[in-house]
Amino acid sequence: MDIRELRYILEIATQQNMTRAAGHLYISQPALSKILKKIEGELGVPLFSRDGTTMVPTEAGKILARWGKKILEDFDTLHQELSELKQMERGRVIFGVPPVVSVLDFPYIIGLFHKAFPKINVQIREAGARSLETMVLDGAVDVAISMRPVLEEGLNELLLIRDQIACIVPCTHIFATKKSITLEDLSTVPINTFPEDFAVHQYLLSKFSAAKLPIHINITSPTSEFLIQVSQMLGQICVMPAPIANHYGISKMVVIPFEPSLPWELCIIFKKNSFVNDAAQALISHIQSQILLPPIDML
């Protein structure tokens, strides 16, 4: 017995008359009688007894009608939810964003997405890029923003922004007049940057290690504005992506690139070989269409 046949049985139980039930179902009475006989044969019990033209449900018929009604309600709800999801009238997406980049256009981008798809629930998770990579793999986050190189295997990457990491230097610092700063320069002074689980921090460690140079990280914070303010107060250098520094319109400090440049590339990540729901796919396409940040010329 399939869903269509179950509807037929419930209609007979509701109308208690084969002719009326057949009319409501837009099929002939002989065809409906044949279907009833088939289903009773499959179940091995009679579902109705005749009292003249009245179809009276048997005990088995009453049980089938009671459970069948619930099954059809659940099936119709399932069909409706799938239909609404297909039309983007409902859904949920968990979006991971590093605090470092959340100050850029992402609040505006998510706001536009909500206006376009007001019935899709967007849940934001903030964490360092490396933590977000693990969260995507574990299924705790659907889509996230990370920094290349992405260390976790099993993730798809879609490039969003290509820029560079820079030094934010107080105007009173001895490096303030430099046009560029090398790793050798930076190895002689304390610097402030993001915490260990942030991609920028790990990227810096890898670069200094490859160059066999010491690195002196003084203060770490997940908050860009805090790093800028404390570095200004202490007269120290902080290292962060150039667009983040430029976002704050800092005064009494200058943004100086590295030589050679340290690229900063942001990408959308999502799990490989895994189902990506329609809401997440819509968010990915929306972000790609909205990222308009101009790249800084690389040295």
Image (cartoon, helix red, strand yellow):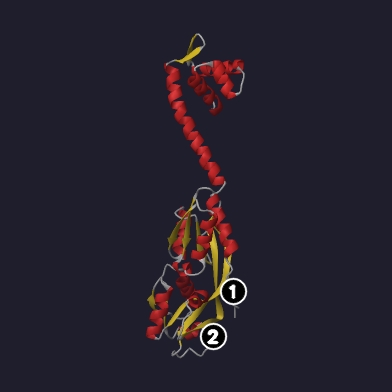
Does residue 65 sit above or below 228 in this rendering? above
Residues 33 and 173: in front is 33
Residues 167 and 204: in front is 167
Q: Residue 68: percent from the left, percent from the top?
A: 47, 26
Kind of residue at badge 2:
Ser
Residue found 49% across the figure and 81% down from its top: 167
Does residue 100 sit above or below 286 in this rendering? below
Direction from residue 28 to residue 54 in the image, left or right: left
Q: Which residue is mark 1?
A: 295
Q: Residue 28: percent from the left, percent from the top?
A: 62, 18
Kind of residue at badge 1:
Pro
Task: Give SS at disc 2.
Answer: loop
Q: Residue 12: percent from the left, percent from the top?
A: 51, 20
Task: Give SS at disc 1.
Answer: loop
Residue found 45% across the figure and 23% down from its top: 65
Residues 97 and 58: in front is 58
Label 2 to label 1: alpha-carbon separation:
18 Å
